[in-house]
Image (cartoon, rainbow, N blue to C red):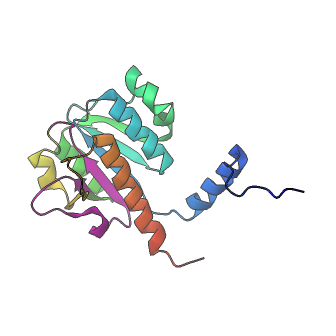
Amino acid sequence: MSTPNPRRQLRPTDVKRLNRTWRRGTEARLALILESVTGPFNIGSIFRTAAAFGVDTVWLAGNATPPTNPKAQKTALGTDRLVAWHEAVPAAEAVKLAKEDGYRVVAVELTGDAKPLHETDLTGDVCLVVGSEDHGCSPALLEACDGVAYIPQVGRVGSFNVSIAAAIAVAEARRQEWTSRAPG
């Protein structure tokens, strides 16, 4: 008689059960502001990540492409309907709306006062901000934020793709929440 292989891929029912376990251990609200992220494939990818990590809402800012764009839809695979989102407004207004909704707003950007992402407190209700693929976050947006964090890199490249940066930041926020809880 053979024993089951514990390294086999999980069946859909097992995946749902696993995800339900993590969802029960997740209480903090998480949001995003996407400032002038115009690449539809980046938008779709960010929405897919947002849905996977339980992001509550996404504020579009500047000239950000909406998730209804057909190319964004191709990457999002329908996940945009699982995350509340708001039409684009000026960046400072998006930050103001997030703060009024009870979020602490942290930009992910390379600035002189930015802290490493893993050393930045991302627990509690937090809204992460990523900026344009070419120019990052605007000065007005950075000024309106509560803090700035950067993703440490040791390779020979100076920055990440915006959708990857958003995924790393969202994953770090959830990791901090999950590891801050007492075992059990």
Q: Is residue 165 left or right of residue 174?
A: left
132 and 56: which one is in front?
A: 132
Q: Is residue 53 left or right of residue 132?
A: right
x then y, percent, for residue 116: 24, 64
x then y, percent, for residue 106: 25, 58
x then y, percent, for residue 177: 44, 67
> Is residue 175 found inside the magenta-colored segment of the image?
no
Asked whether residue 130 appears in the rendered view, the answer is yes
Query: Relative to residue 92, is residue 28 depicted above or below?
Result: below
Residue beneath the point at 20% across and 45% down: 93
- Specify the quadrant that holds the C terminus: bottom right
Query: Relative to residue 81, is residue 101 depicted above or below?
Result: below
x then y, percent, for residue 161: 28, 41
Give the extent of the magenta segment: 106-134
- Specify the quadrant that holds the N terminus: bottom right
Residue beneath the point at 42% across and 58% down: 29
Query: Relative to residue 1, is residue 48 depicted above or below?
Result: above
Q: Is residue 163 left or right of residue 92?
A: right
Query: Relative to residue 18, is residue 40 depicted above or below?
Result: above
Which residue, as the protein is rendered here, is positioned at the far bottom? 182
Q: Is residue 117 left or right of residue 45?
A: left
Residue beneath the point at 66% across and 48% down: 9
50 and 5: which one is in front?
A: 5
